[in-house]
């Protein structure tokens, strides 16, 4: 049942529905007291997805809430326009520079070599050997990576050093540094305040420790909330557990919602590719080329995948809707389900492990 342009509702019947609303459809903004007082005094508060131009940043004191890629990009863009720019976050996160010398960072974070150092229950060969027989080498790799990236970006400074170790931040807690590699932040041209938000004030924000930060514009780069408001209550209860984590087999179908699939809940580094391969998987399911396991088996697999993620990523981000840091493991699983080998299996060992994922490998030939 749906409505068109505010007109009366209409109903149609379909054999199968693919839900593609994705995980970035509803902005997540903290509900802070006194927002009306801030607006009455001329303040502007918007989610990052609602910042369509730079006018709200010009000649103002700007606060950007968050430490993800959007927050850092907006703070960097505001710097030449605003009177002052301050990033407010609960904690800092590990980042990787866009280039190390002349080498694009994608070869470090979107390659099979990077995934070698993260354990997964499907691992075989060298990856299994590393984690089973030489855990000291895995520890050394992560210590050297943390020291190298941290030194290069200045993230080893006490005020910038992330709380979580890098190895437990891979996936959604790990991303690209700003284009200036944190120079503005390290030099104090962009301010940084760590703490929890308490409320708006007429002239800015107050943190839970009593600190007040002056601002006329507040940009919440605070991510998005998962929701499927168009589903019936029983289906929403089947899709999301009590913590709001989607229960999706292969991150594509919910065992307890028949005749429906969800594409776009499998992002991670190369979201266009994972969505494309997910669409092919769904198409093969509809064409009868895939047979789903029974409900109990699918739910057991979902539980195993979520447990694996919690073991590796020590932050509640991306659970049930993000494949990183297991991107290649996930893509290989979808390929295997469709009766296909890993897409890059014809490449040399060097090219498979030391070059970034290549979407053209997945093109049907």
Image (spheres, grey):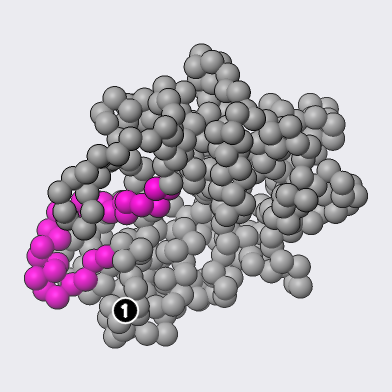
19 and 205: which is toward the camera: 19
Quadrant where the N terminus sits is top left
Q: x, y (%) of residue 194?
A: 38, 57
Residue at the (18%, 61%) spot, across then down: 200
Where, by quadrant of the figure, is residue 226 drawn? Answer: top left
Residue 37 lies in the magenta stretch? yes
Where, by quadrant of the figure, is residue 40 drawn? Answer: bottom left
What's the magenta region?
A: 21-46
Residue at the (39%, 48%) spot, across then down: 21
SS at circle 1: helix
Q: x, y (%) of residue 338?
A: 69, 34
Q: x, y (%) of residue 347?
A: 87, 49
318 and 273: which is toward the camera: 273
Residue at the (41%, 42%) spot, across then down: 19
User: Neighbour class for label 1 at 10 Å: few (<14), some, many (≥20)?
Assistant: many
Res. 139 in view: no
Task: Locate residue 67 relative to residue 10 in the image: left or right.
Answer: right
Task: Locate residue 273 relative to residue 207 in the image: left or right.
Answer: right
Q: Which residue was labeled with disc 1?
A: 57
Task: Give above or below for 87 relative to 145.
Answer: below
Res. 185 in view: yes
Residue at the (53%, 29%) spot, across then down: 249
Task: Locate residue 272 relative to residue 42 in the image: left or right.
Answer: right
């Amino acid at each position: 049942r749906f409505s068109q342009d505010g007109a009366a509702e209409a109903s149609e019947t379909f054999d199968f529905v693919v839900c593609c609303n994705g995980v970035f459809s509803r902005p997540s903004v903290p509900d802070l007291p006194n927002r009306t007082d801030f607006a009455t005094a001329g303040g502007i508060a918007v989610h990052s997805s609602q910042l369509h131009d730079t006018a709200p940043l010009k000649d103002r004191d700007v606060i950007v809430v968050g430490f993800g890629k959007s927050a850092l990009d907006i703070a960097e863009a505001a710097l030449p326009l605003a009177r002052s720019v301050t990033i407010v976050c609960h904690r800092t996160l590990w980042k990787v520079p866009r280039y190390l010398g002349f080498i694009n960072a994608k070869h470090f974070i979107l390659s099979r070599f990077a995934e070698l150092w993260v354990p997964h229950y499907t691992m075989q060969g060298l990856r299994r050997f590393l984690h089973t027989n030489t855990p000291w080498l895995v520890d050394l790799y992560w210590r050297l990576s943390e020291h190298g990236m941290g030194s290069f970006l200045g993230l080893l400074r006490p005020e910038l050093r992330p709380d979580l170790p890098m190895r437990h931040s891979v996936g959604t807690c790990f991303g690209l540094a700003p284009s200036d590699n944190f120079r503005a932040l390290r030099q104090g041209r962009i301010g940084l305040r760590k703490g929890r938000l308490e409320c708006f004030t007429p002239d800015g924000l107050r943190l839970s420790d009593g600190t007040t930060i002056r601002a006329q514009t507040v940009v919440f780069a605070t991510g998005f909330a998962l929701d499927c408001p168009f589903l019936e209550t029983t289906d929403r209860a089947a899709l999301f557990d009590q913590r709001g984590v989607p229960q999706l087999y292969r991150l594509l179908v919910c065992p307890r919602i028949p005749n429906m699939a969800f594409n776009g809940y499998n992002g991670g580094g190369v979201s266009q590719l994972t969505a494309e391969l997910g669409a092919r998987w769904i198409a093969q399911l509809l064409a009868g080329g895939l047979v789903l396991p029974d409900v109990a088996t699918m739910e057991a697999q979902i539980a195993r995948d979520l447990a694996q993620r919690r073991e590796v990523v020590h932050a509640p981000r991306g659970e049930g809707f993000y494949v990183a840091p297991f991107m290649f493991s996930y893509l290989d699983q979808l390929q295997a389900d469709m009766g296909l080998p890993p897409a890059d299996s014809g490449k040399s060992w060097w090219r498979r492990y030391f070059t970034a994922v290549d979407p053209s490998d997945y093109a049907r030939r």
